Image: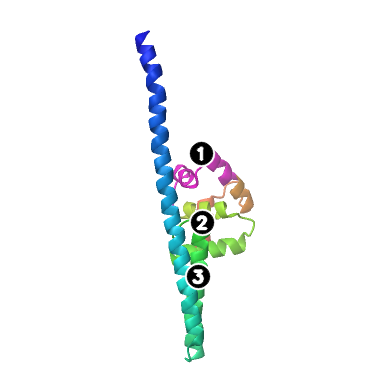
Amino acid sequence: MNTQAEVGKKLPADYEKEIGELRSRVANQDLELTRVSTAIAEKTSSLRNLLDQIHALEIDSNVKRTMTDACLTLIETETIEKRLNMELTESDSVFLSKLQKKHANLNQRELRISLLVKLNYDTREIGRSVGISTRGMESIRYRMHKKLGLGKHQSIKTYLSELAIA
């Protein structure tokens, strides 16, 4: 009986410790998210200022267009990153733009999951990243399969990889 009483006392203490650790992790992740969001906002603001300066330059119109297009692409990438809370490479940004144009019915979470699938993350890792269970992730992939209009035996990963290089 004494061991059961000791176990009964230990469990609440263990839970309290675990809760404290989880709260600490959440607080650290919240700080990191705030830092990243602020950095993205600052980058976007700097890019907009640069864009204004480029417009004011008296240079060849083709050079000016090339420079402004580059700035606009970077601003678009920053905006997508902010929505997805991820840092994107240029090819990731191009892929997401293609996917969004071809499948406007996908929501932000599905776009993020699509990118992670294309980047070879497995279902468990994606679920952890998005904050849902593996089973929940499997359900989302099933619904995405339908939204993408894929056949019963078509792979989402194959489809997304082919779309990326198309």
Q: Which residue occupies 47% across, 52% down?
A: 116
The Cα–Cα distance between marks 3 and 1, rounded to whole angstroms, is 33 Å
Marks 1 and 2: which is nearer the front?
2
Q: Which one is nearer the viewer's eye here, 165 or 139?
A: 139
What amino acid is at disc 3?
Ile
Q: Quadrant of residue 2?
A: top left
Q: Quadrant of residue 43?
A: bottom left
Q: Are marks 3 and 1 in contact (CB under 8 Å)?
A: no
Label 2: few (<14), some (14–19) or many (≥20) C-alpha neighbours in 10 Å:
some
Q: Which one is nearer the viewer's eye here, 8 or 151?
A: 8
Q: Position of residue 31 (x, y in %)?
A: 42, 51
Q: Can you say whether 57 is above or below 14 in the image?
A: below
* 109 left or right of 105 in image: left
The Cα–Cα distance between marks 1 and 2, rounded to whole angstroms, is 19 Å
What residue occupies the far top of the structure in this picture?
Answer: 1
Q: Can you say whether 157 is above or below 164 in the image?
A: above
Image mark for residue 84: 2
Q: Position of residue 40 (x, y in %)?
A: 46, 63
Residue beneath label 1, please? Answer: 133
Span colored in magenta: 120-142
Q: Is residue 128 magenta?
A: yes
Does residue 88 appear in the picture of this structure? no
